[in-house]
Image (spheres, coloured by chain):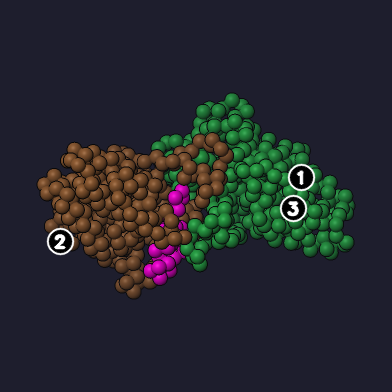
Chain colours: A brown, B green
Amino acid sequence: MIDQRALPGRLRFITCATVDDVCDAINTLAVRGAPALGATGAYGVALAARTLGNARSVRAAAKRIVATRPTAVNLAWGVGRAMHAFEHAGATGALAEAETIADEDVARNRALGAHGAELLGVGGTVLTHCNAGALACVGYGTALGVIRAAAERGKRPRVWVDETRPVLQGARLTAWELDRLGIDATLVADVAAASLMAAGEVDCVVVGADRIAANGDVANKVGTYGLAVLAHHHHVPFYVAAPTSTIDVRTPDGAAITVEERDPAEVTTFAGTRIAPLGMAVANPAFDVTPARLVAAIVTEAGIARRPYRRSLASHIRLAAAHSF
Amino acid sequence: MIDQRALPGRLRFITCATVDDVCDAINTLAVRGAPALGATGAYGVALAARTLGNARSVRAAAKRIVATRPTAVNLAWGVGRAMHAFEHAGATGALAEAETIADEDVARNRALGAHGAELLGVGGTVLTHCNAGALACVGYGTALGVIRAAAERGKRPRVWVDETRPVLQGARLTAWELDRLGIDATLVADVAAASLMAAGEVDCVVVGADRIAANGDVANKVGTYGLAVLAHHHHVPFYVAAPTSTIDVRTPDGAAITVEERDPAEVTTFAGTRIAPLGMAVANPAFDVTPARLVAAIVTEAGIARRPYRRSLASHIRLAAAHSF
């Protein structure tokens, strides 16, 4: 897989030969992005099934992989699908299921992008946060999938790229993807979003998601909730783009979502340089939760879901399951 | 003066021997913070008066100093006061005026802090953005002056420190100051402020200002406006702390304030490491404007100003001028 830590400086690939390698790659953000974590989790199970001696070890490995990151539900979903296949058809079944997930990911994202492109006007400006592009998936992207589908349809979107502190997925990954796609993009510090909206420079916000609760509350990269409040204040529509695998019907609402607290060093150091006094106390939540009432629409591979989300999201899950990708 | 670029790693001092040195120190943010720029501008004029041959050269130097940074009005104010003294009493007059400004700064900030401390509850949490501490002034601080005055009065404030991208004045300077003062402080990425407010973890926001228009609109470090909108949404009071020298009665409202656009490299590189693709387009406004209706109070050395600000700010200016500091 691409080592996302090395971008944008280097396009470097890494190979995971063991379950430890997989857990390390997830923990250190070599691979990140909810749909990419789904596929990685499934391949991790396939790897465990091939390299470990017995079913009990494979089940233990699956638990370890799921535990690496608690917020993105796709990881548990991918591991769960591959484990189901493993229990029924062994290592071969687990690998086949991982490959199905990977193949479907691109097809689902293309469908999602086609639906979402309808929401963007010609020559409109879109603000996005973090990276929900091809890098965050197996390919094509979710929020960036919407933007590139709009570009493919001649809509010439112009994108504001939030740098996305503390790990800078916007500056490092989204900027790199949009540059390669030839889509008009301008990088800004996260704090500039509010005045851009006040100046009428943002026609809509499109972000990905790490977990969508049954009621439509959305967990995504920290900063997303603030953008949703700002968008609401400025009457700018706020859209979420995610495959139905990100919808967790067993999570009733946002209050039930665990938000991962990450290493303070992500905040106190920058590109290897310490930027805060030694021993400084730090809070570093990796995600936040946006209440459904601030979300104008949730775009999935099944279409555009609107409020009330409990009903529309359940319908999207049924539609997506019935459709072959 | 302290070289603020070297903090928090090193406490280094620099000496300005020429007007060029002064302009460089301002341009490169070796000295920043509206009240500090006021004193620096006045000392810059005193230096010009002492080192340059004639009044015309001094006037040209004063113009060059004012032009270094367009948003903070204190710079023009400090230069203006020193030039007025120079025109009446020559180089000696200019230096005396600069020293008066420097001496008064600390006294005014202490008075401001005492007024502002009334707004903070015992054991309350305060979120601040950028650095409006002693470093941003000649001493004591404005927004941090309010916080330290509350601490001196036994109120045990707990402070959330926004790191303040792109130049990280919060992480580098405010965290350093609060650490030295022994005040409870926790550093967060700017994007974490919204979820902290949603969780009820922020009792008020206190920030400084670079220019306050006659109607109470406030120009301050980019990200301030977003915080004001978030505070409004979460019913958290949003306070501005600044000396009356920051109020510019000749600027009718925020629309008339020039917002400085700074070097894209502040966003695309950090400590010499590139964090965005080469050639990436960047928008890097250094400030934003918060409309008066989102500001719960403006604290000056004359007291606590409330809406309507046109009247209360004019009264503060009269009171401050009549009072000897």
Whether residue B295 sits left or right of residue A27 in the image: it is: right
Task: Tell me where residue A19 sits by quadrant.
Answer: top left
Badge 1 is on which residue? B101
Whether residue A123 sits left or right of residue A56 in the image: it is: right
Q: Nearer the viewer, residue B311 or B92?
A: B92
Q: Point out residue B150 in the picture as x, y percentages from the top left corner.
A: 59, 31
Q: What residue is rendered at 59% in x and 60% in y?
A: B262
Q: Nearer the viewer, residue A76 or A144?
A: A76
To which chain does the residue with label 2 belong? A
Badge 3 is on which residue? B41
Q: Which mark is residue B36?
A: none
Badge 2 is on which residue? A324
Q: Which residues are magenta?
A: A164-187
Q: Residue furthest bottom?
A: A154
Q: Amino acid at mark 3?
A: Gly
Q: Amino acid at mark 1?
A: Ile
Q: Between tags 3 and 2, which lies in front?
A: 2
